[in-house]
Amino acid sequence: PGLLADLLPLAQCYVSASKPVPQELVRAIDRIFPALRFFRHVDGHVALFHGAGSGNLYLAAAVLRHDQNGARPLGHMPHSGYQRLARGGTVIIADTGVPPSGPHGFGGHASCLAFEMSSGRQRLIVNSGIDSLHREKYREMARMTAAHSTLVLDDTSSARFAGFGHSARDGR
């Protein structure tokens, strides 16, 4: 919600100045709204995948008031591999995609098949998210499989992290 909270006033500045809003800005906003609806639980909190923090649920609600489409959340995010199941007041959001590769994988998480589940206003199964104080020493731990609501076998992470010029490490 934070990025959207920055982009919406920027778009309004163009409108107030009687200037056309750049199409790149319009397209970015139009892509973020469905993603925010997709990852939002019934209680208003956003799912904790890939470094997302618990954030401000009031900020998410405030920016969604500007969503002119207001459609129901999608059942899947085709470019990321996430799936959303919702029935009644129960929501399951799952990471069913492949891990990112190349430069996109630099900040990725070993969260294959991780999921979150909520029922009504209660979040029952969640990922750990990020350290709210953004301490560097916890960043790598938050990327490991064990920090996500998925199966860990033999205390081994589901992905190996390596940076350019660094040796591979499995996150154990």
Image: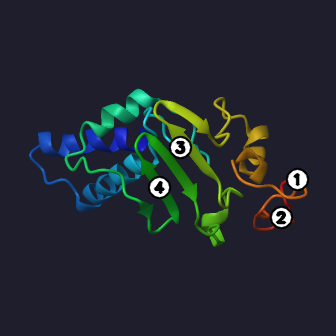
Q: Which amino acid, mark 3?
A: Ala
Q: Are marks 3 and 4 in contact (CB under 8 Å)?
A: no
Q: Which amino acid, mark 2?
A: His
Q: Is residue 96 above or below residue 72?
A: below
Q: Which residue is mark 4?
A: 84
Q: Is residue 82 above or below residue 12?
A: below
Q: Which residue is mark 2?
A: 166
Mark 3 and mark 4: Cα distance apart in space: 11 Å
Q: Which of marks 2 and 4 precedes in the sequence?
A: 4
Residue farthest to the right? 154
Q: Nearer the viewer, mark 4 or mark 1?
A: 4
Q: Is 120 left or right of 153, judged from the image as shown?
A: left
Q: Is residue 148 above or below residue 54?
A: below
Name the residue located 79 percent from the left edge and 39 percent from the top edge.
137
Q: Which of marks 1 and 3 precedes in the sequence?
A: 3
Name the residue located 33 percent from the left edge and 49 percent from the top edge.
33
Dot 3 falls on a residue whose secondary structure is loop
Colouring rule applied to residues:
rainbow
Local packing at callout 4 (Cα closer than 10 Å; few below 14, some 14-19, many 20+) is some
Q: Nearer the viewer, mark 2 or mark 3?
A: 3
Mark 4 and mark 2: Cα distance apart in space: 36 Å
Q: Which amino acid, mark 1?
A: Arg
Q: Which residue is mark 1?
A: 172
Mark 2 and mark 1: Cα distance apart in space: 16 Å
Mark 4 and mark 1: Cα distance apart in space: 30 Å
Q: Are marks 3 and 1 in contact (CB under 8 Å)?
A: no
Dot 1 falls on a residue whose secondary structure is loop
Residue 140, how many percent across, how many down? 76, 48
Dot 4 falls on a residue whose secondary structure is strand
Q: Which of marks 4 and 3 precedes in the sequence?
A: 3
Which quarter of the picture shows residue 167?
bottom right
Q: Quadrant of the N terminus?
A: top left
